[in-house]
Image: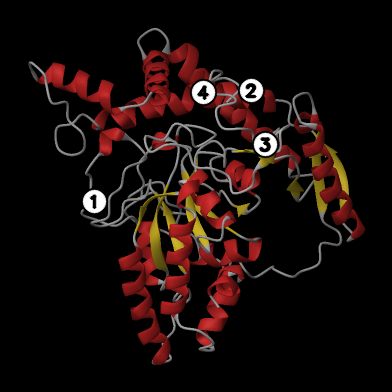
Amino acid sequence: MSGSLLALSLAELRDGLRRREFSATEVAQAYNDAVEQVQPLNAYITPTPERALAMAKAADARLARGAALPLDGVPIAVKDLFCTRDVPTTAASHILDGFRPPYESTVTEKLWRAGAVMLGKTNLDEFAMGSSNTTSWYGPAVNPWQRKGHGGDNRPLVSGGSSGGSAAAVAAHAAAAATGTDTGGSIRQPAAHSGVSGLKPTYGAVSRYGLVAYASSLDQAGPIAKSAADLALVMNAMAGFDPRDSTSVERPKEDYSRHLGERVAGLRIGLPREYFGEGVAPGVRRAVDEAVRWFEREGARTVPVELPNAKLGIPAYYVIAPAEASSNLARFDGVRYGHRASRYTDLADMYGRTRAEGFGAEVKRRILVGTYVLSHGYYDAYYLQAQKVRRLIARDFLAAFERCDVVFGPTAPSTAFEIGAKSDDPVEM
């Protein structure tokens, strides 16, 4: 029974629970067992099996009364970047050792109010800074899919980053869905590398309250699930205006499931040549081409579009994101919570030693880059210039969407690579 439960989509689980074909407690236990079985993947930092069963029992009580909530009994994993009341929140960093938030993030609060069941906190790149989930203080998350080596041995692959634990958990059937965050690809890329579905919503559609900040003008929370249909159901629970988040957009509530099943005849697919140039692996290009051909057979048509400033995206990102990170991460100093150095001479020494011990190499690198580009004499040359480039990139997309309804392209230039393969090259990573 447990294996068949794990194979069900989120929508199938929800409908089966409402028909009383199985109980929320049975589902939670099946997923708790799965979480334990996939421990070698290191997808979870903190499993919460007791909490899952308690929440499932509460869901069963509501289902028995005929008072089902939208996601009643559906087991969901939480990226360990969302604050969860009284449950450790680490951001996969040594500097947050022992931190148990006294409050709940808006996203998780909305999910629990919708009846979802918490399976635990998933692994990620430290403070969401990375593309492989190898910068985590708790070790890398491993892709459930593996590559055979020349000798027939299994080569462990990255699950992608930074939401690698969430993607690995869903791909391994150790979560029906999971939350992720995306600053520069951290939902989309691990979803692609792990063979599941992921969505970075429009900035402001999902509250960032209670989300450990990396780059505040880029961070956005979103779902990872088995399919687009499941993503829509999670988004229906996650999204919405939040007065506690100054960047949250107040707009009418949306049903993200409303267009599921509609035909795509007449859809205009924009194909930017900038997305299919040097650096895209042949297999990735073939997969995108096959997807385009499927849409064309269904009645969609392709149109060429141009994104002339696309090549500036990564340089602009690596100015804006580290600049905002250097400011956001200043609060982690060992004074009120988390790790504190055991030996120091004065307050300044305590700050320095705590941050040197608590942050990993990639986080330190980005803090230093961010501090540099914000420093006197360099702000205009780097940070202000990057903001102008960002505006040019946005204008390119606005122009493209005058000619097409969607833009197609590879999520990442390559498929999942072996753990450690790119660790010595931060630019390529």
Q: Earlier in the sequence, mark 1 or mark 3?
A: 1
Label 4 with label 2: CB-CB less than 8 Å:
no
Q: In the rendered view of the protein, which quadrant contains the N terminus? A: bottom right
Compare residues 91 and 246 and report the one nearer the observer: 91
Which-is-in-front pick, marks 1 and 4? 1
Q: Is residue 367 something one can see in this rendering?
A: yes
Give the SS element for disc 4.
helix
Q: Earlier in the sequence, mark 4 or mark 2?
A: 2
From the image, tell me which residue sits under label 3.
Answer: 412
Residue kind at label 3, given as amino acid type: Ala
Q: Is residue 368 left or right of residue 238?
A: left
Q: Residue at x 82, y 50 (%)?
A: 291
The CA distance from mark 4 to mark 2 is: 10 Å
Label 1 with label 3: CB-CB less than 8 Å:
no
Residue 318 circle label:
4
Give the SS element for disc 3.
loop
From the image, tell me which residue sits under label 2.
Answer: 312
Residue 165 circle label:
none
Give the SS element for disc 1.
loop
Q: Earlier in the sequence, mark 3 or mark 2?
A: 2
Q: Is residue 239 something one can see in this rendering?
A: no
The CA distance from mark 3 to mark 2 is: 16 Å
Q: Residue furthest top?
A: 377
